[in-house]
Image: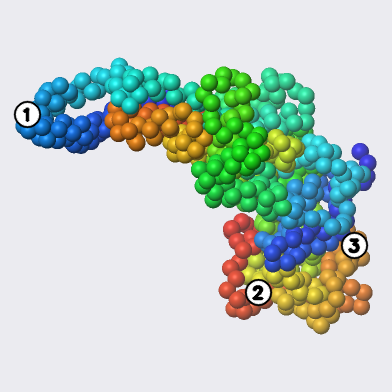
Amino acid sequence: MSDDPLLSIRDLRTVFHTDEGLVRAVDGVSFDVGRGETVCIVGESGSGKTVTGESITRLIRSPPGEIPDGEVVFDGQDLTTLSDDALRDLRGGRIAHVFQNPQGALNPVYTVGWQIVEAIQLHDDADQPTARRRAIDLLDRVGIPEATRRFDDYPHEFSGGMKQRVSLAMSLATNPDLLIADEPTTALDVTIQNQILTLLDELQSEFEMSILLITHDLGVVAEVADRVVVMYAGKVMERGDVFDVFERPSHPYTRALLDCLPGRGDGTGSIGGHLPPPTDPPAGCRFHPRCPHAVDACREGEQPPATPVDGDEDHVVSCVHYEPGGDPSVVRGENGGTVPADDPAADGGRSPDVADDGRPDR
Amino acid sequence: MRWYVVRRVAWAVVATFLILSITWGLLAITPNPAAEQMQFQAAASGGSAEAAEEAFEARRGLDRSPWDRYREYMINMATLNWGWSQSRSQSVTDAIASALPYTAIYSIPTTILSILLGLSIGLYSATHQYTKTDYAATFFAFFGYAIPNFWFGIILLLVFGVQLGWFPVVFDSDVPIFGLGMVQQLVLPVVVLVTGTIAGIMRYSRAEALEYVEAEFVKTARAKGADGYRILTRHILRPAAVPLMTILVGDILGIFLAASYLVEVVFGIPGLGQLSYNAIIAQDTSLVLGTTLIFTFVSVVGNLIQDVAYTILDPRIDYGDR
């Protein structure tokens, strides 16, 4: 095993050509996923986290999607320049995906067994009995009771949580190195969410894989992440070790997100304002229209570069107040504690859509 | 599911029975033109119109009770004794049997071609939505939809039959059925029918496939590493086949029912459509009845096949033991 990260994303840009104009869904995103590590991308809906996940193996539909520049280096290979055939080998081979909605992720007209066997046989020369045995083993491993009997059942005969387990079994079919899980628990109810997260955790050590978990739920992040990437409007606002980010949240957006968590801040916070229009993001820092600490320097030029927080190269933030000559205490307050979010009365009626499902902070 | 199929078949039998009964009822209350003619002749030659009517009815067995007549009619229907065609001087079943192959030789290739071409063009359009090829296919489809079959047939005959002389203008039924000559004279009718039916199949398969192109499970299939062809056939076409069954059965029945009249008359093919058309012109009641019932049975069987196909194609449809 080398010391290089398994996945290294540099200045990734993904744009969509739409009738309303060019949507820069992912606009210069950089982060690494180490071997055996769990990295979480957090952000509210529309922040570009799903597109980031789907850009890695170019799952985005093209057209209208396009990846004009950036690098996605997976185990030393740049996936953005890889041929379609080679990429197909990676998809479902070394890089597996699990999607948000288990109801839709399985094809309704095939048995779950058929779909797992398909995943196995697309990458291995396993004959039918062998593939069937492996599929039953996988179903058993992800906690489907009576796996042999359920093998021939159709997706509509499973509950949502069970379907997500089937999806997981399918993604593990070829023993992947990287599992990209896009909100795998969002569509499930809270008790099932925990079961799936625990299962993911067990499977990670068993299959020795890295997980890139995309979520809007900071509670999930606190539970499973090693490292966190906070995204907003297609940009990375802050990234670092999960303890650093939760203990010393540095970007005003991260702080606002954390303040929305029950049991943290005043527990009733919501972030005022809206995501900027995707076709016409504001100049300067993307978050400045909603930021309580915005100054003139935030409103012009480009998104500020990723700056180490307190000299820690592994914890970076994109905020003018942390740049050389800036004053981080503007954001952190004198004692470095959390600051209240923007006045909720001025939020323009936006409902709190971040961490709003009442998960306790751990 | 076996029980469901049994019930569908039973229902098809009941439907056929009802259709036959209603047809009999309508015929029973319709004034008979032959009887009127008899009465007119009798009156003209100074005889009694009423006596002539009674004599006619006695000869045709119409003086018996409606129940007896109904029972005999149903027995005749069931035993394929469908009456005598006066205009063709042969039994109705013989007339239909001799016409059926001519309908089959153009409608079977038409069905196969329009499903194959319609599905492939539709699927291609769905996966290449809003490209130039998609627009071209859409233009072609609406051209086929909009142009009247019989007019298109006449124009093709004029251009390729009369002016260029590539294809015969008049259908020759003496040409052996399995031969190049037959293929040559079937090209134009098949082209006319295919341009008409392909459009519906293409537009529907495009719409149905589009619903699935964006589906989550198609993304799952791509994430599993399936290639484009596998995704198209296994993950888009297969689920789309369920709703497509309806339009496919409808279109195929449409070829038999409506298009065959126009095309057979324009191209002079001695098939079922022309048989029925000539029977109507000649007021040959038993032959009209016979040809109409053939079309009706085809519809009943088509719908039966469609209902059974649904349960086979879509595992979510489960009627239990109802």
- The image quarter containing residue A263 is bottom right
Residue B186 makes an appearance in the image: yes
Which residue occupies 10% across, 25% down?
Answer: B55
Q: Nearer the viewer, mark 1 or mark 2?
A: 1
Residue B212 makes an appearance in the image: no
Disc 3 on helix, strand or loop? strand
Which residue is tagged 2?
Answer: A273
Alpha-carbon distance for marks 3 and 1?
118 Å
Under mark 2, the amino acid is: Gly
Which residue is tagged 3?
Answer: A312
Under mark 3, the amino acid is: Asp
Which of the labelled discs sits on residue B51, or is there none? 1
Which residue occupies 77% across, 79% down?
Answer: A294
**Above/below status of B257 relative to A319:** above
* Circle 2 crowding by C-alpha within 10 Å: few under 14, some 14–19, many from 20: some
Under mark 1, the amino acid is: Ala
Disc 1 on helix, strand or loop? helix
Q: Nearer the viewer, mark 3 or mark 2?
A: 2
* Dot placed on the residue nearer the N-terminal end, 3 or 2: 2
Q: Could you say which is closer to the camera, residue B5 or residue A338? A: B5
Residue B164 point in image, percent of width and height = 66, 39
Alpha-carbon distance for marks 3 and 2?
31 Å
